[in-house]
Image (cartoon, rainbow, N blue to C red):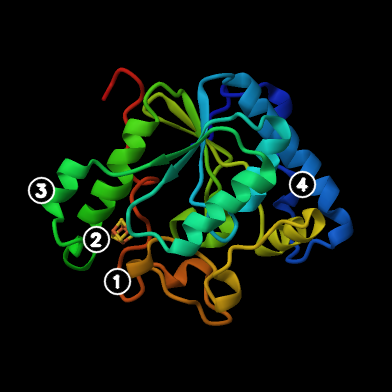
Amino acid sequence: MPDSSAFPAAHHRAPAASSATSVVPEALAPAVDLSTHDFLAGAISSFSGRIALVSSFGAEAAVLLHLAAKIDTAIPIIFLDTGKLFGETLRYRDTLIRHLGLRDVRSIRPDERRIVAEDPQGMLWRSDPDRCCALRKVEPLVRALDGFAAWINGRKRSHGGLRAALPLVERVEGRVKINPLANWTAADVAAYFAAHDLPPHPLEEDGYRSIGCLPCTYRTAPGEEARAGRWRGRDKTECGIHLTVLPARGED
Ligand code: SF4
C-alpha cells in the first residue's frame, strides 16, 4: 500500500510519465525527468543518510542511476553480485560507475560458507531456484540493507505480472521502499536513454531486455513482456527480494 506519511505532500503526485500514452516524444523527456527527479530528491532528502539504492545494473538501470547521480553521486548503491551474473553486467557496472561518477557502489556477494554448504556445485539454480535466489540475492540484500530506513529500486508497472499494480511508495515491516519509476513505460526509458546519451547494456542489442543471472536469463521475442525471458519455462517470475518481508534495522 502506498504510504502517505513517507514524504512531504508535494512529492505524492505521480511523476509525469504516468500518462497512458505509449510513446513519449524525446522533446518531452526533460519534463519527465523533472517530475521524477523531484520525487526522488524528496525521498533522498527525507531519509538523508539512511537511504540506499538497489540496482541490478541491468538493461534499464542507467535511468535510475543517472537520476540519482544528479542528486547525490555518493548515495549508497547496492549491487547484488550473485556469482552467476553475465560478465557483461559486471563490466557494465564499471562503465556506469565511471560514466556517472558514482562514488559508493557496494558489490555484495553471497555468504561463501552458505554457498559451500548448500550449493557446492553451483547448480542449485536448476534444482531449487527459489533457494538459490534466497542464498544469492535475498540474504545478501538483508545484510546490505542493515542500517538503512529506506531503499530505492527501479521496478515499473510496465514490467507486468506482479508489478502491474506497483505503488510509488511502500512500507514493508518498518522499512520504506521507493519506486520512483513505477509509472514509466518502455518508451519513457528509451527516451531518457536517448536524451541523456546513456550507454546501453551490452547484451541489449543481442535481444536481452531484462537481465539477471546467466543461467536464468533468456532473450525475449518481439511482443513478449520484458521479463518473459527470466526463469523461462518455470512458474517463477521474481527472485524474491521484492516478495520477502525484509527485516528492518534491529529486527534481523
Ligand atoms: Fe540462482 Fe538463477 Fe536466482 Fe541467480 S536468478 S540467484 S542463478 S536461481
Mark 2 or mark 4: which comes first in sequence?
4
Mark 2 or mark 3: which comes first in sequence?
3
Coordinates of residue 174 in the picture (x, y in percent): 40, 24
The residue that mark 3 highlights is: 117
Mark 3 or mark 4: which comes first in sequence?
4
Q: Residue visible at 28% across and 44% down?
A: 110
Mark 1 or mark 3: which comes first in sequence?
3
On whether ligand 1 comes within 8 Å of the CB at mark 2, the answer is: yes
Q: Secondary structure at mark 1?
A: loop
Front one among 173 and 63: 63
- The circle on residue 129 is 2
What is the three-letter code of the residue carrying label 3? Ala
The residue that mark 4 highlights is: 16
Q: Residue visible at 32% across and 76% down?
A: 233
Q: Residue visible at 45% across and 71% down?
A: 228
Cα–Cα gap, marks 2 and 4 = 37 Å
Cα–Cα gap, marks 3 and 4 = 48 Å
- Single out the mark in the foreground, 3 or 4: 3
